[in-house]
Image: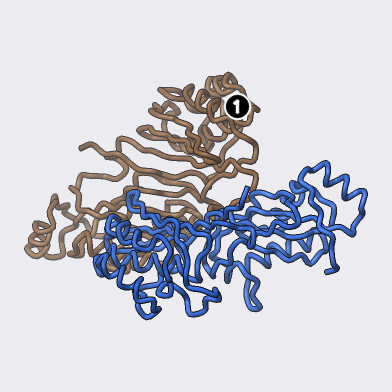
Chain colours: A blue, B brown
Amino acid sequence: MKPFTVRFERGRGALLDTLEANGSDRMTRFAFTVEFDGRPFMGWQRQAHGPSVQQALEDAIHAITGEQAVIHAAGRTDAGVHGLAMHAHADIEKPITPFRLMEAMNARLRPQPVAIMGCEIVPGDWHARFSCTGRSYVYRIANRRAPLTFESGLVWRVIQPLDAAAMQEAAQLLVGRHDFTTFRSAHCQAESPLKSLDRLDVERDGDRIAIHAEARSFLHHQVRSMVGCLALVGMGRWTVEDMRAARDAKDRAALGLNAPPDGLYFVRARYPG
Amino acid sequence: MKPFTVRFERGRGALLDTLEANGSDRMTRFAFTVEFDGRPFMGWQRQAHGPSVQQALEDAIHAITGEQAVIHAAGRTDAGVHGLAMHAHADIEKPITPFRLMEAMNARLRPQPVAIMGCEIVPGDWHARFSCTGRSYVYRIANRRAPLTFESGLVWRVIQPLDAAAMQEAAQLLVGRHDFTTFRSAHCQAESPLKSLDRLDVERDGDRIAIHAEARSFLHHQVRSMVGCLALVGMGRWTVEDMRAARDAKDRAALGLNAPPDGLYFVRARYPG
């Protein structure tokens, strides 16, 4: 990919004027809102040996533009984790409006379960990952005995009755600034295990439990690890004090359970302004 | 299957006492609540040339009991139509508790997307189809431009913006006792096209539209045909008066559109008492 001059265009008219005036030696930065079902993917990030959401998107852009654009995302989800509104961006040279790019990408992405829900032009210094100031996830549990039908791979089925009130109480011990080493994958590449968790709420609706997590950023496996321990509290196998002890141990060995990827959804990313 | 004497047992203890006292020449009627994802099935009813929910259930019972039990259901859904709480029954000779039968069936049904959500013993004159006094369906529409990801085959995607208020107004023209010939499949086996529709409500929640239908019974394709015409009203291609004219035509040729099976769910059946 050749070096590019970033354009700071916001309006469609201005963009087209610029593209016409400057020809093809200009890159435009497009931001995408992406919904994806993580079941068939090895994760968001491009992998050598299996399908990824990143590759699906980059292949679609290549088919449309002939360009080898690189997609950058607000977060990198693991295999089997889903996205409701993942934000991502790519720099594209071909003159095309956001609407036509979105439509062409959706046509090319079929039949893969990835959809471009929104597309817009952003300033060249806007970065889906580095500009992001907040990320939210939801973890969905089906608290039922019967096997899953519609949602196999889309929720975590927990057979044991879960006490959502006890889970909510334990969750509040994790909110705030803590050393989350206990809840961090051995493969986590973050510089520090210190993170500020802004929200961790457990809500029950019938046989469904949703756990909402919000922070500026998360460690690798942090949400799944927190959810796994909350489930132990819900089952009565851990007390709320056991959760406090696990947190304070700052030791991965103190982790009770890592929840499966099935129930995890990247909900949205927040950006300034 | 040999002739059987039906037992009128309600309690588990009484059942086991009876089974022990009478041996294996007694049948017990079990009622099931069944959840199923209709995507892989040719419909509820057993077919010669493809998988059906009925066959999945009968095969599971056969594997557990060695018996060729026949499953009777509150309704027979078409290919691709789903069930949230379909009620069904079967007569079984083998001494087994409802809980153990449910567990064994769920184990045998895997990996098919069919789950027994409840199982109980009912009187021998209780019939899932003939005792049923009310049936409810919901039809789910995703009113969005982007292709479906999680819910391909589980909702009807309609790209054109739908006016749910106009749809609701048109829907009320169908509530009550009418000749529903316009909304009836050519293959419908009902004796009369006269039906009483108790409820037809259109509710929007974001980009989702749910259409709730309730009646004692429905004609073949009635819900899908009503929904198809409501969608035409929602798109502005039909006026509310066009819906009235279609109803009054009592002619299948007046049907505007038959909605696809994807969005249709049998919600529940009602029984006296």
Q: In which quarter of the view is residue B68 placed?
A: bottom left
Helix, strand or loop for disc 1: helix
Q: Is residue A140 above or below residue A192?
A: above
Identified at 63% across, 68% down, the residue is: A52
Answer whether residue B172 is visible to the viewer in this image: yes
Residue B120, horizontal then vertical, whole percent? 22, 53
Q: Is residue B73 left or right of residue A6?
A: left
Q: Position of residue A55 (x, y in %)?
A: 68, 67
* In the rendered image, the vertical position of residue B43 relative to residue B136, given as above or below: below
Amino acid at dot 1: Ala
Task: Please indicate whether residue B64 sits to the left or right of residue B255 in the image.
Answer: left
Q: Chain of mark 1?
A: B
| Mark 1 Cα shell of 10 Å, populated few (<14), some (14-19), many (≥20) | some
Is A156 placed above or below B124 here? Answer: below
In the depicted structure, whether residue B86 falls above or below residue B225: below
Residue A165 falls in image quadrant: bottom left
Can you say which quadrant of the picture contains the N terminus of chain A?
Answer: bottom right
Q: Which residue is mark 1?
A: B254
Residue B161 position within the rendered picture, expressed as x and y whole percent measured from the top left: 62, 35
Nearer to the camera, B239 or A5: A5
Residue B45 position, x and y percent, is: 42, 51
- Between B173 and B78, which is closer to the camera in this rendering? B173
Q: Is residue B196 left or right of residue A165?
A: right
Task: Say left or right for A28 vs A127.
Answer: right
Identity of the residue drawn at 43% across and 64% down: A177
